[in-house]
Image: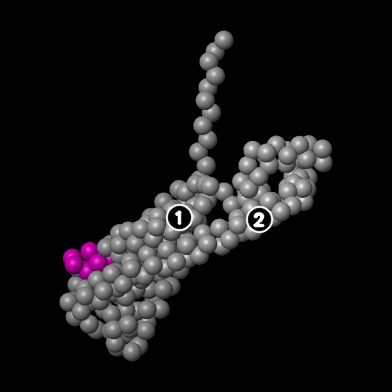
């Protein structure tokens, strides 16, 4: 008899936490730094001022992204923990009612009432809180928020994203700076959108187009402000 093959499945839901933070960080790093550079350049600043402004924006942005992601994701963790505490108490005080509630969830999902009751009883006997967390609250281990991971991913990816337009400032200057930074950044963003879409299982062309459009708009507005007021923005 042929040996049984071990069936492995690779789902993308486990990537959601770090992928979202990494893509957001890299995208924001490119867009904000490139927009800042273009805006300052359009205001007529010299090469050193443009570079220093870009570096300042990079450092401030990376720290802001890390702090924002940590606080945001930690808030989600706190909310989930609070819900789990409430659910744990309800299971302890009225297990029968919670068992009926769990069974009704399975009935709504298509199980026959008798089978739903059996499933609810067996899952509750194994891990009642886990069953309610997953099937009632929608909290799963795969998508559990990880504040530190999200903060580090955002800061690191922002740094990588910001480095790209900054490198263009180092190698190009004068009248070439604005078009080179704008076009180069849009190319980077298109690649980022395509890669992110690929990692998430979405359409790469749509992902690239979506990121490129909004990023181009952001840079155009910033350049317009710089040119209009003639000051560093």
List the residue tagged with mark 2: 89
Mark yes or no: residue 190 visible.
no
Q: CA distance from mark 1 to mark 2?
A: 25 Å
Q: Horizontal and vertical percent for residue 223?
A: 35, 79
Residue plotted at (43% across, 59% down): 147
> Which class describes the residues within 10 Å of circle 1: few (<14), some (14-19), or many (20+)?
some
The correct choice, above or below, for 97 with respect to 8 in the image is: below
Q: Tell me the quarter of the picture where residue 38 sits.
A: bottom left
Residue plotted at (37% across, 84% down): 225
The segment highlighted magenta reads: 165-171
Residue plotted at (70% across, 37% down): 122
* Viewport quadrant of the C terminus: bottom left
Q: How many marks?
A: 2
Residue plotted at (53% across, 22% down): 5
Is 73 left or right of 103, judged from the image as shown?
Answer: left
* Viewport quadrant of the N terminus: top right
User: Given the current orientation, which residue lies at the most extreme bottom position?
Assistant: 229
Is 209 left or right of 26, judged from the image as shown?
Answer: right
Along the viewing direction, whichever of 203 and 14 lies nearer the viewer = 14
Is 101 left or right of 149, judged from the image as shown?
Answer: right
List the residue tagged with mark 1: 146
Secondary structure mostly taken by the magenta-highlighted segment of the chain:
helix
Q: Tell me the quarter of the picture where residue 159 sits.
A: bottom left
The correct choice, above or below, for 114 with respect to 166 in the image is: above
> Which class describes the residues within 10 Å of circle 2: few (<14), some (14-19), or many (20+)?
few
Mark 2 residue element: helix
Q: Horizontal and vertical percent for residue 86?
A: 64, 58
């Amino acid at each position: 008899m042929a040996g049984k093959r071990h069936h492995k499945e690779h789902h993308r839901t486990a990537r959601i936490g770090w992928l979202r933070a990494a893509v957001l960080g890299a995208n924001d790093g490119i867009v904000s730094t490139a927009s800042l550079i273009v805006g300052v350049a359009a205001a007529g600043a010299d090469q050193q001022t443009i570079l220093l402004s870009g570096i300042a924006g990079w450092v401030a942005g990376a720290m802001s992204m890390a702090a924002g992601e940590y606080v945001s994701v930690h808030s989600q963790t706190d909310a989930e923990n609070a819900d789990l505490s409430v659910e744990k108490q309800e299971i302890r005080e009225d297990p029968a009612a919670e068992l009926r509630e769990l069974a009704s969830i399975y009935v709504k999902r298509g199980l026959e009432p008798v089978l739903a009751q059996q499933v609810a009883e067996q899952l509750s006997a194994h891990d009642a809180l886990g069953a309610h967390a997953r099937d009632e609250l929608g909290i799963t281990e795969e998508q559990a928020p990880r504040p530190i991971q999200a903060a580090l991913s955002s800061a690191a990816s922002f740094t990588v994203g910001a480095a790209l337009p900054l490198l263009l400032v180092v190698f190009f200057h004068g009248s070439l700076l604005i078009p080179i930074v704008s076009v180069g950044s849009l190319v980077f963003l298109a690649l980022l959108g395509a890669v992110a879409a690929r990692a998430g299982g979405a359409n790469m062309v749509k992902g690239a187009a979506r990121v490129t459009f909004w990023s181009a708009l952001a840079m155009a507005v910033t350049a317009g402000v710089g040119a209009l007021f003639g000051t560093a923005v």
